[in-house]
Amino acid sequence: MPYPLDAAAVRTWCGLALEALGRERERIDAINVYPVADGDTGTNLYLTLESAARAVEAAFDGHGSAGTQPDLAAAVGAMAHGALIGARGNSGTILAQLLRGMAQVLAAAPTGGSGAPDALRRALRRAASAAYEAVAHPVEGTVLTVATAAADAAELSAADAGEAAEAAEVARAAHQGAVKALRATPEQLAVLGQAGVVDAGGCGLVALLGALADALSGEVTAEPVAVQAGGPVPEAAGCAVMPPGADGCADPHVGGPAFEVIYLLEAGDADVARLRDRLDRLGDSLVVVGGDGLWNVHVHVDDAGAAVEAGIEAGRPYRIRITHFGAGPRAKEPALAPRAVVAVMPGAGLAALCADAGATPVTVRPGEPPASGELVQAIRQAHAREVMLLPNDPELRHTAAAAAEQARAEGVRVALIPTRSAVQGLAALAVHEPGRSFDQDMVAMTAAAGATRYAELAVAEHRSWTMAGVCQAGDVLGLIDGDVVVIGPDLARTAMTVLDRMLSAGGELVTLVLGADVPASLAEGLERHVRERHLAVDTVVYEGGAHAAPLLIGVE
């Protein structure tokens, strides 16, 4: 029996698509020759969709306590937003726009029923149109062509099966149309034909549409078919087109821009329009997706600084990622470091502190926890044989464990240090010693984290029940080891109460991490309080920067 087009179907679609891209990631990477032969299209698509899937799960979790489920609009909206904030590379940015286009139509669609097939047809058409609009200079023979063919096939399904067709039949027709278009991409784009491959981004879209058809029909898509010069050949690697004598390899982006620049941008429509014009003059492969004040910007340039400055003039860029294309796959890799530390940190100040200590930081914003793929990327970036991974958040335990397992499968020895707070991470980092054996270093860092009690001060956003009683919006909450133990009227007095409770059990060192909007006078007052009330206890103060909590406290 076909399944209705509802929130549950979107959730299933995300899961199946993530599995499909996980299986095909390395194959898609291997055939990535356009626009840059940097071998990361499959990985970028996977990481983008992982962010989308996490957002959908968060939407369901938000309704779980009430025993309800999100509606279709909330689910597809979460999927599109998650892809937007987590988009990686040219392919991931376009994928985010495809999902945004679908969400714009499906958000207003009826759940199941006779209107769902037509809504899906219109959603696929809007997705293809939105993707073309986002790309500064569209090129045929790419994922754009495949998306258009999928929309065409979906619309033809109405004529073939009548308006009574199920949404599952529309999705299956779109998938089949995409497969046919994918096979033709080497004839449309010369660089693909020369390398003997189909378009990597289009291959990822085929996997995504196949997962949608599976989610709506409950049936598994047959294994994809590879196309060879002599005709179709059944093969698990469904994305390769290998004419006789071709080896599937291609030269890197010789003569093209040196850097890939990606960032999220908070800006208005008029500012983004001017930004598009400026970036188009600076480089190529320009893709700007999003709307409603939040955008994902992707461009290839020689002057990465100018691309970031353009974003600063347009609005507020963040999550800035700059990748140097280098000399291509034949360039000599630098030697692996013996051991490195990767630490998740809330706020730029703490991230900079970690970087100064030699660690590789993963900076996070409130409400946007990193996906396992981001942690794996950071482990790769650390470029070491052995890595100490500090999640610094109890909610990231499973995410960090998944990242560690994937990195181990790639040959990196990873120790997951069970840090539950940024201050525990700082304590662990302080005793890190690469000269020790791996096991000794892991034990020392774990012991230092475990010996550090942690607290956080936050401001209540609404009235609610806590372990310390009822709080009102605007109250300052003091949390020790994750539990609310103090409700106070202001930050200073609440912090002093929390410190006294923590130091009543003893301690030698207090660590204070101040948020961006907290005055330095607060730290001075707390230092004085500790000095007067608790003899022989030292205090150190760090700036946490934007997006850190108002105050983090560690006691060792």
Image (spheres, grey):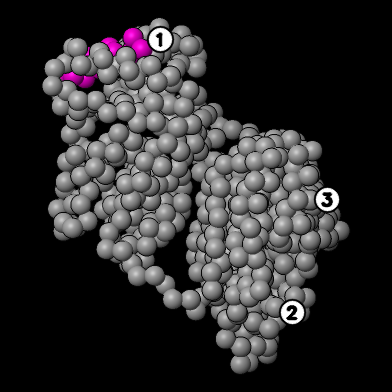
Residue 425 against residue 251 in the figure, above or below: above
Dot 3 or dot 2, earlier in sequence: 3
Distance from disc 3 to disc 1, alpha carbons, whole Å, reads: 63 Å
Q: Is residue 157 left or right of residue 387?
A: right
* Residue 503 colored in magenta in the image: yes
Could you tell me residue 386's position as x and y percent?
A: 28, 60
Q: Residue furthest bottom?
A: 245
Could you tell me residue 505's position as x and y percent?
A: 14, 20
Main secondary structure along the magenta-highlighted residues:
helix
Q: Which mark is residue 206?
A: none
Residue at position x 62%, y 84% in the image: 242
How many residues crowd mark 1 within 10 Å: few (<14), some (14–19), many (20+)? few
Q: Which mark is residue 490?
A: 1
Dot 3 or dot 1, earlier in sequence: 3
Could you tell me residue 337's position as x and y percent?
A: 31, 64
Q: Amino acid under label 3?
A: Glu
Residue that mark 3 sits on: 163
Residue that mark 2 sits on: 190
* Residue 526 colored in magenta in the image: no
Magenta-drawn segment: 492-505
For the residue pair 54 and 134, the one nearer the viewer reads as 134
Residue 318 against residue 377 in the figure, above or below: above
Q: How many marks?
A: 3
For the residue pair 22 and 336, the one nearer the viewer reads as 336
Q: Amino acid under label 1?
A: Asp
